Image (cartoon, helix red, strand yellow):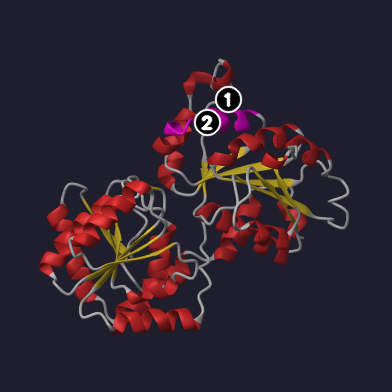
Amino acid sequence: MAAAMTGRPRPFVLVCHDAQKAGVPILTLDLARALGARGYDPVFLLGNAGPLLDRFRAIGPVFILAEGWDATGLASALPQRTAALINTSAAAGLAVPLAQAGLDCLVLLHEMPDYIRDQGLMPDLRLAQEAGARLIASIPQISRGISPLISPGTSRGKAGPPGGAPCPVGQLRPGIIPPPTSLASFRRARLWRQRQDGPVFIGAGHADKRKGFDLFLDAARRIRAAQPGARFVWLGALDSWARDLANAALAEGLPLALPGFVEDCLGWYRAADVYLLTSRQDPGPTTAIHAAAVGTPFVGYAADIGLIGMTEGVGRFLPPEDEAGFVAAAVAAASAVTSGSRRDLRRLIRRETGFGPYVTALLSRFHLAADREA
């Protein structure tokens, strides 16, 4: 471990669960590049590997626990108070040995409270906090939901704060870097769009019940009845449950495109008129903001969604049981899209989701951050 740190005078540890093509690993890579540009030396600790592993290795040394590397060993080779950023609660358990070894640990929480509890991750968060790590939620709803459940000592049966007061979880809204998309990808999507004779509605994410893929298809059928020329796209991998639903919808004649996971996705979002946010539970989702970054608004169900209350001018939420209202709002939103509305939405997203200010704010949460920046 010490040999791997040779020639890296300003190590900055970034931790995440794996290197899959998903939001958290991609955000970790974006953060690493931004930190490298500010003079830090990114070092990665991953629970498991994945298809993005080469991208991690191109930035800095990578240690994968599943291959036998030891988090305590890594920490022992680093100076005390070295910054360690643990990206999301799935990796919170790794904050414990790092914090106990004297690293300055910050755990970012992107999942909704119910999901964290259902996945059995709450004990890891409590242990991480007891070890000295600090917890930062990406949206207020996560902070409000987690804070009452996190109290020092609760994982070991100790008493919490005096009077049972909750130990608060901080909050910092993430910045966003839209996925790099080539001009050729935009052109291909535009040519596809030009062949369509009606509005295009898009959804995205790993298609499962939590993402509401079934609700997306239900809405598509209703929209199709109101707008016979409408077309539909879902970006993302489909699990077996979603694949069966998609096959049935295609057999019915629903005009549904399924490109799978598309890394340079902005062309598809630009080709759509409206993003359909049908998730039952979702902290972001970043995909809806990526769509807005190219001027495509969303219509969503007001379920357990972290964006609620943070999307003025970006989209509209309807009650989860109001399927007819959802469809009417989606059709109306598609009819209202103009080049001017797209331009205004792009400007709004650039102003509200800058990545540079987010990185600066994250650094300010670490001890001695001001000295490092100086």
Quadrant the C terminus occupies: bottom right
| Residue at position x 50%, y 75% in the image | 181
Where residue 197 appears, as percent x and y from the top left, is: 21, 80
Where residue 88 appears, as percent x and y from the top left, is: 55, 44
Q: State the mark number for residue 152.
A: 1
Seen in the image, is 223 located left or right of residue 107?
Answer: left
* Disc nearer the start of the sequence (2/1): 1
Badge 1 crowding class, 10 Å Cα cut-off, few under 14, some 14 to 19, many 20 or more, is some
Viewer-proximal residue among 373 and 274: 274
| Residue at position x 49%, y 54% in the image | 173
Where residue 253 appears, as percent x and y from the top left, is: 19, 65
| Residue at position x 60%, y 28% in the image | 127
Where residue 310 appears, as percent x and y from the top left, is: 37, 56
Residue type marked 1 = Pro
In the picture of the structure, the residue carrying the numbered disc 2 is: 167
Q: State the mark number for residue 312.
A: none
Residue type marked 2 = Cys
Seen in the image, is 213 located left or right of residue 174?
Answer: left
* The residue stretch that appears in magenta: 117-130
Q: Are marks 2 and 1 in contact (CB under 8 Å)?
A: yes
Residue 47 seen by the camera: yes
